Every structure is written in structure tokens, then in C-alpha cells.
Image: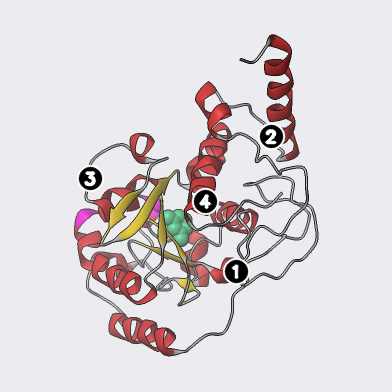
Amino acid sequence: MLNKRDIYTALIEVVRFYKRLDFDVLPSIPFELTAVRPHPEAAQPRLMHPVQATVVASQPKDPISPSQAAPQVIVKASKLDSNRQDLLQDIRDEIGQCTRCKLHTGRKNIVFGEGAPYARLMFIGEGPGADEDIQGRPFVGRAGKLLTSLINKMGFERQAVYIANIVKCRPPGNRDPEEDEMKGCIGFLEKQIAVINPEIIVTLGSVSTRILLKTDKRISDLRGHFHEYRGIKVMPTFHPSYLLRNSSQKWTTWNDALMVLKELGLQPLE
Ligand code: URA
């Protein structure tokens, strides 16, 4: 049985832990405090990812927001069998200069997706924004920087995961993709997932979660639990654009990220 002093000490430890991570807002739900307890070995600097490990020493401060420090990347992209790369290229070739839906009229570039063909972890957003449309790459704008930072702070190089979207062309004015647009495009994502065959998919926001899991439930009800897509575990979490507007939800997102790492047999970076 904990006495008052023990509880106080434990609380201080938790607050210190989050302070080190540079959270600017305390979580509003007390549950999150207990759910994301500091790892018992949190004090010792350690190599978190036993697999494919390369340590670049530096001290990440914030598990989500970009920091000045160079990312402490543990899981690096590696050159592996080119077979899956070829299969992905086949899918890209099949898309061609797509005119299957109305989104093609306003797009500058098709945003196919990028990352490691053998990624253990895949992130899926809804559709490209303005920056992605210009560069032809997923998640490279403000929200993308936040996502990249989250990926790095989970211990992965961005190139070591795979990032894609439900639709591959930018919906005008950053509106949500419409049903016909998603219906026309989802087949390509399904093929990408089949080739990459990740251990875990993280769906970012309600659109990709709804489409992949074929559900109408709210993201806030779905996040924090594993679901399943064709035998692959799916962790829904908040979209990074939402996190830019609702910084307190970084806590919950980090919580989801910790669950993903645990499922992969990895631990978060200190
Ligand atoms: N938002 C998304 O859902 N996808 C992107 O690629 C960029 C922003």
C-alpha cells in the first residue's frame, strides 16, 4: 500500500519524465498519466531497438515536436532485396498519369508513397496537401514534419518506415477526399500494403482509419487499441494536422506510439 509520500514521489517522477519530453501541456485525462508511466529503466541511456541497431548519440527532448537536436535514429533504412521495390514500382506504373477521378484535374504531382519496402511499420494518412502536391512526396509539410519527428522519436529513420495516403492526388483546398475518389484509389494502397506487409499500420486521423477499418466509429474511440486489417495490426491515432491545433493530444498520440513500439518488441528512446 502506497503512503502519501510515495504517491507524491511517484507523481513528481512522472511529471519530470514528461518535462524531459518537453510537453507543453499536461494531459487532461488522469488515465493517461498512469497509462504512460515512465519506463522503469528510463534513467539509464540505452539502446532501445535491438534489431538493425545503429546508435547516433544525442538527446531527444520531445517525443513528437521537432527539436533542434539531430534525431537519435536507431532503426535505419537498409538496402534489402529489391524484389518488393520492383513490385511497388509495378503499382506505380499501373497508376501511370492517372485520370480515374476528378482529383487529377488540379494536381501537380501524384503522391505515391515512400519508405522501406520491407518496413515493419507503415503510416497511412488521408491525402496529399499543398506541399506534398508540389514535391510529390507524402507528409512533407508542417504536419509531415511533426510526423517525421514522431517517427524519429520512436527510434526509426523516416526512410525505415513506409508512408502513404488513401488518395494519391491532392483534394482541392485540403478538403477531405470524397467517397468516389477514395473508392477509385484505395485499390492501389491495398496493393502497396500487400507488398510491404508491415507488422503494424498506424492510421493517421479519422479518414484513413474509417476507410481501412471500414468503420464509422470516432477516432477518439478507436485510438489506443489495436484493430485488424487483413491480418495486420492497426493502431489508429490522431492526424498530425490535428495535433498542430490540439497540442495536448500529443500525449495520447505518444501513448499510441508506445503501444506500437511495445507490440514490435521495441522500447522508446530516452
Ligand atoms: N496530410 C495527409 O493526410 N497526408 C499527407 O501526405 C500530408 C498531409
On the image, numbered disc 3 is attached to which residue? Answer: 215
The amino acid sitting under disc 2 is Tyr
Is residue 208 placed above or below 91 in the rendered structure?
above
In the rendered image, the quadrant that contains the N terminus is top right
Q: Position of residue 249 (x, y in %)?
A: 53, 35
Q: Nearer the viewer, residue 81 or 240?
A: 81
Separation of residues labelled 3 and 4 (CA atoms): 25 Å
On the image, numbered disc 2 is attached to which residue? Answer: 18
The amino acid sitting under disc 3 is Thr
The amino acid sitting under disc 4 is Lys
Q: Is residue 66 left or right of residue 97?
A: right
Q: Position of residue 267 (x, y in %)?
A: 61, 52
- The residue sitting at the front extreme is 1
Which quarter of the figure has residue 92? Answer: bottom left
Q: Is residue 30 left or right of residue 189?
A: right
Density class for disc 1 (Cα within 10 Å; few <14, some 14-19, many ≥20) is few
The amino acid sitting under disc 1 is Val
Density class for disc 2 (Cα within 10 Å; few <14, some 14-19, many ≥20) is many
On the image, numbered disc 1 is attached to which residue? Answer: 51
- Report if residue 73 is visible in the image: yes
Disc with the residue nearer the chain's start (3 vs 1): 1
Task: Give the mark toward the camera: 2 or 4.
Answer: 4
Secondary structure beneath label 3: loop
Q: Position of residue 160 (x, y in %)?
A: 56, 70
| Magenta extent | 173-179
Residue 262 — which label? 4
Task: Give the mark toward the camera: 2 or 3.
Answer: 2
For the point 25% across and 54% down, the residue is 178
Separation of residues labelled 4 and 1 (CA atoms): 14 Å
Secondary structure beneath label 4: helix
Q: Position of residue 84 (x, y in %)?
A: 40, 84
